[in-house]
Structures are given as C-alpha cells and as structure tokens.
Amino acid sequence: MREDLQKFIDTIPAVKDASRLKETFWINDRMISQAEERITMLHPDQIADARNRLERFAPYLEEVFPELRETKGIIESELRDIPGMKDFLNTAYGAEIEGRLMLKMDSHLPISGSVKARGGIYEVLKHGEDLALEAGLLKETDNYRMLAEPKFREFFGNYTVQVGSTGNLGMSIGIMSAKLGFHVIVHMSADAKQWKKDLLRGRGVEVIEYADDYCAAVEQGRKNSDADEMSYFVDDENSRNLFLGYSVAGERLKKQLDQQNIPVDSDHPLFVYIPCGIGGAPGGVTYGLKQIYGDHVHCFFTEPVHACCMLLGMATGLQDQVSVKDFGIDGRTDADGLAVGRPSAFVGKVVEPVLSGIATIEDKKLYDLMRGLLDREDIFIEPSACASFGALIHPAHLKRCLEKEGLSDKMKNATHIAWATGGNMVPEETRRAYLNMGLE
Ligand SMILES: *Cc1c(COP(=O)(O)O)cnc(C)c1O
C-alpha cells in the first residue's frame, strides 16, 4: 500500500470500499452538462473518419469473412430486448429496474466474438491501409476487395504487428492481422485462457506466454516491437485508433434504436452499462454515444472488485499514476477481459467530464448473472461481459445518481442497455465449466 494514498481512503467512501475489496459504486461529481462539446483531445470528425474507413474496408471484409456476407462487410451486433433478465434482476437482486432492459450483443460480434472486434480490427485495418497507401499500392477510391489478392498478402508479410493482451484484444488483432497477411505476435498475460492461445496458434499467430500480469505482457511486447523497425505495436494503453474504432458504435446504436422506434430525449433517458478493463472499449463507446445523445445518455462502467483500476484512477484523479497494487489489491479476477491493474490515462481524461459513475462487482456474482441470462433469455455471454449488469444491482446507489441528475420521475420511460462485451467464441467445454462455477 502506497502511503500517500491513505488520504483518499479517508475522504472518499468508494475508494475506502474498493481498498477493502467491497463492492462499491462511485458517482462522478466531476461530470458536467454538455461536456462532450468541450473535449479537446479528440474531435467528432475523427469518428466520421473511422466510420468511413470501415466502409471502405467493407467489400474486403465481406470477401474474406463469409460470416460478413449478410451485412455486406459491416461488423455489427444485435440490440435485443431482455424482459426475462429484467425480471430476474428485479426478483433475485431487488434491482427495481423500471422501463426497458436491452442487451447490446457484442458478445456475438462476427470474427472475434467480443467488443474488441470494433477497436482491435479497426486499428489493424487502419495500419494496413496506411502502409498500402504509402507504398502506392492502394488509393482511397479503390475497391478494397483487391486487398484479398496475393500481392497484398505478400506485401503485408514483410511487416509485423504485435500486441499485449489478456485474451480478447489478442484475438481480434491476431485474427485480423493474420488474415491480411501480417506476421503477428500476441504477448499473452497469465490471465489469458488456454483456448484463446490455441485458437490463435491455429490461425498462424505467434503467441508468447508470460507468467506475469497484463502490464508485463504489454511491456515486453512494446520492447520487442520497438527493436524492429518493420513492426507495429498496438498500444492498448494509449491508442487513439482503438478508441475511435469503438466510438463508431455510438451512431450504429442510434440507428438500431431508431429502427426499433425507441426514443431517446429529455423525457426518455438512455442508460448504458459497460464492463471496463483498461478503459478503451467502454470509453470509446461512451464518447461515441455522448456525441450523439449528449445529456440524454448516462454511461456507467463496471469493474471487478479485484481489478477496479479505473474507479481508483478517476475517484482519486490520479488516473494512470495509480494502480490497484498501490492500494494492496492483487488484480486477480476470473473476468479475464477486465483483469487490468492500471487504467489508460488518455481514456480517463477524455471521459472524466461525461461519465456518470463506476460500479464494482464480485466474481462470484458474474457466474450467477451468467446463469440467469442463459436461463431467462437463452443467451450465453462470458463472465467479464456479465459485469454489464453490475451497476443495475445497486439500486440505492443508482437512485442517488438519478436524483443528482434530476431523472427520478422519468425512469418509467427509460431504456437501459447492458453492453455484453464477449462470449460466443468460448468453447463448449469451457462454457460448461463456467456454468458450474460457484455452485458448490
Ligand atoms: C476488453 C474487454 C472489456 C473492456 O475493454 P477495455 O478496453 O479493456 O476497457 C470488456 N469486456 C470484455 C469481454 C473484454 O474483452
């Protein structure tokens, strides 16, 4: 425990709870109205740029991934009503959810079955495009279907892509890079599941394993990559490109809500709950949604009790200058996608004025929520993704937050969206093991 941190434990109740490994809920008192217009580190035009790039690549993606034929190369997931899960949360957890509860099923995103299929794949495509444009092999006006030709695979084969990952980011970067023809190395931390390593190796990805945590894997990956001028490092801690890939989800979600005639305005608030690791995925989605809905959308992150790095970084204002270990927290969690001990500094600063709050959840509840969703809705998502229900099961805290934001009388008209961040690539055997966890 770092001594200079004691003052935060003494003065901020959520930090005190977090340091004692108790589930907690931090309400962001630095949030300000219409803050999205004042964020200077990024510009909304960059979201449009990312969307346009994904559209340029759509013909290529449709060509090389058969599962993308139906959507013509656009990687998107379903938004589904889950009334049975609402009932489960209300009865089993006393959640008192009013209005509509929906699931954003990034757990079932094509290609890599997690939210990382947004940011991770986007960043690899951007890098590939940059290289091909610079080499004069490609123009933005070309039909990118031609990237499937052998001459491009040969070209990309001269280059290496590297990334450090707890699993899902490695899956997205690995699968996409290998498909384009890159040599790709994924540095995996001890938390990463064996089946993810096996799957990647089966697709021609080089996987290097570490006995240490995520930060160590990232550090070594970065070093390896820096030593090779033909190598590109996907930097989960600082990458603007990853973040922008995630942010495109905002306008995509709006389209889906519009199609389902679900209003979002001052009388119909939208609540979005997203599991948080280093912060890129939930931060990018939040940034994208805030640009569209402004004060009508309310975003919450959830972290495991043992890996609550974003909560500690934001509540203390120290951002990446503090890690869970500095508070004597071990960082060990079954939620492998969220097993991160130090938050991104960049994301924390961007979302600080727009984020409503951060909840934490115990691992054993993740399994219970997983069984509840499977039982009531016949949908399987992985333990990390079940953290998306973590804020909803703390109704007293949520109510406090609603009062602060003046929303208490509007909750009957509210739409709640739990962002299911991963799951459909989990092998059958692992699913069965998960479903029996914590039942003894
Ligand atoms: C990576 C991941 C997250 C969180 O994303 P970060 O960018 O690390 O915050 C959430 N859920 C799952 C399943 C993930 O793989």
Image (spheres, rainbow, N blue to C red):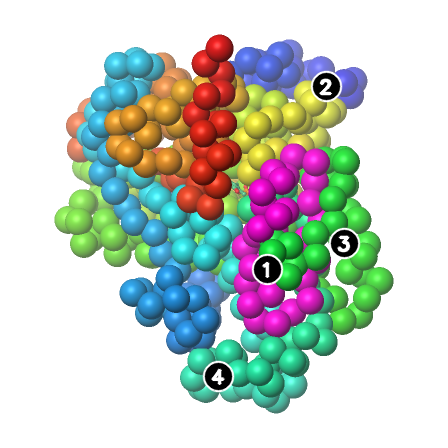
Q: Residue at x 57, y 27 (%)?
A: 334
Query: Which image quarter: residue 105?
Result: top left
Instruction: Say what secondary structure mark 4 lies in.
Output: helix
Direction from residue 83 to residue 440 in the image, left or right: right
Q: Which residue is mark 4?
A: 146
Q: Residue at x 84, y 62 (%)?
A: 227
Label located before the other in sequence (4 or 1): 4
Q: CA distance from mark 4 to mark 1?
A: 22 Å
Task: State the mark number for residue 328.
Answer: 2
Q: Is mark 3 within 8 Å of ligand 1?
A: no
Query: Which image quarter: residue 332?
Result: top right
Q: CA distance from mark 3 to mark 2?
A: 26 Å
Q: Which residue is mark 3?
A: 222
Q: Which residue is mark 1?
A: 203
Coordinates of residue 133 in the picture (x, y in percent): 59, 82
Range of residues picked out in magenta: 170-199
Residues at discs 2 and 1 in contact (Cβ within 8 Å): no
